[in-house]
Amino acid sequence: MVAVGEWFKLPRLGKEFFVSLMKAGLVYDKSKGFKADANSNLMAISSILKRALGEDFEFVPRCFTCNSMIECYSCAYYLICDVKSSTSSCLCDNCISNEDAFAIYNKTLMKKMS
Amino acid sequence: MWVEKYRPKSVEEMVGNEESRIEFLNWLKEWKRGSKPALLIGPPGTGKTTVVHLVAKKLGYNMIELNASDVRTKEKMMQKLGPSLGSKGLFGEKLLIFLDEVDGMYERQDRGGIEFVEELIEKSIAPIVMAANLEDDKKIVKLIRKSKVFRFTRIPPRFVEIYVDNVLKKENVKLSKEAIRLIVRESKGDMRAAINTAQSFSGLSTEEISSTISSRDLTYSLREGFESFFNADSQEKAYEALKNCDAMPKDKVRLAYTSVVNSDLSNDELIKALEKIGEADEIVKMIGKTQEWRLLRYFDRVLAYSLFNAIPKGAVNYSEDDMPWNLKIRMWNESKALKSFGKSLSKFLHASSREVISTYMPYLLLILSRDKESMERFFKALGLDDSTLKVMMKEAERISVRVK
């Protein structure tokens, strides 16, 4: 699992896979590695990497308020949610179950906006 | 109405698309003459228009707005925007030009509008902000290249949940967590719909909410779904039609296919449409192979978005061929081989290749099927290639089984 927007390393996959990944919008930096951003097609990248690595590869969102990684499988909205195919952030189980979830969200947003 | 009462009054009160909101705010803060225009792209109902209004208000901009309801021909736009192109506001106030739904400007009634927008980008001394629903539309690729793009996605359901929860707290209405989740699921990421539903359900029990929602569930038959799809005004409506269509994905692919091949599309349009159907079929195939049923959630979107953009509106109607799909595929795949067999034998039998296939072939294959080696020799003597040979051997096998 890799969080959207974060740099990660991959083993050498060969020219063909590399070109496909670039076409799907994965960002590459020689020193930092790879990163998915707002222009990336997450679904395509995951599928290319699954083929290339021979194992499941998944992008996961980070919690907007506490920045922890979120696993989507257990979410009540799994079937109707686009977060996994977009670069959007979400809220983790802990933060959403907080009584003041909205106030905390707002505080974080104000902090990031200032 | 709660939806009016709780409409965000500042950009900080909104939820979802935080990164894009912050980036857009910073873009306008730092805007200087010569900066690229802003282009906000995302599906309807994701807050693009609201964010432009609220950010403009926050930074003290007066806004000149042209939306889809205005006629946006070059002349009309010139009339409305012309005076503000080369000057600052009369009292030195800051101006912002906002063109909503620019992707809808390519319709016939907006002739010349998009060229005007391109001119506007070059000349304007005020910041220009545009909003569009479609990203993969080739027509706005030009604008994308010239603009600073901010992408908006559907508001994640968990953000809708905390917003609705907050509204309910302020209204002193108690709904269970499960009831709120039902409302959020029902709204499918649309904040306005969620707040309206929450208001209409306030005071109901979770069971009552659940039964109301399930009775409201809109499902289409295959026919209704595809009729709505082919007549949809927008990509989003087309997607909704397919999504609410109660049918298996392979049936949707089959129906999209039969409808497209029975239409009057030009060859180029037909090829494009079939390619798009093929892409959706790949997902069905992938699910069958890997059993990863979670991919199913992408299927309707892929089929709806790609096919909708590949066919001209009104050019395709619902059509269901009554010939079984598998038989049709077999006929197409094998027609080349059968023709080649008919042609090679016709000169010996003094008959047309069609007659060879329909009259002689079944008997000939039946006789030959009794001795596999002789059959192979016979076909080879006719000079048939390997793929034709394979098809004919299979056909002989089928006939012999049927006769037995």
Image (spheres, coloured by chain):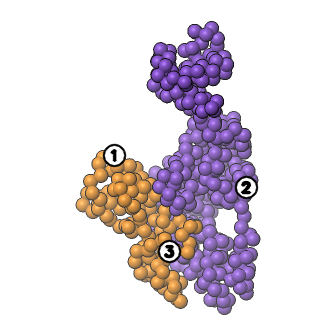
The residue identified by callout 2 is B221
* Label 2: element kind: loop
Which chain did the renderer colour orange? A
The residue identified by callout 3 is A74
Looking at the rendered structure, the kind of residue marked 1 is Glu
Quote the CA–CA distance across marks 3 and 2: 31 Å
Residue A68 in view:
yes
Q: Position of residue B52 (x, y in %)?
A: 56, 68
> What colour do you see for chain B?
purple
Looking at the rendered structure, the kind of residue marked 2 is Ser
Residue B280 lies left or right of residue A17; in this view the side is right
Which chain does the residue under circle 2 lie in? B
Tell me the quarter of the image containing the N terminus of chain A: bottom left
User: Depth-wise, is mark 2 or mark 1 nearer the camera?
Assistant: 2
Which chain does the residue under circle 3 lie in? A
Q: Position of residue B254 (x, y in %)?
A: 64, 45
Residue at left offset 72%, top offset 64%: B218
Residue at left offset 73%, top offset 76%: B211
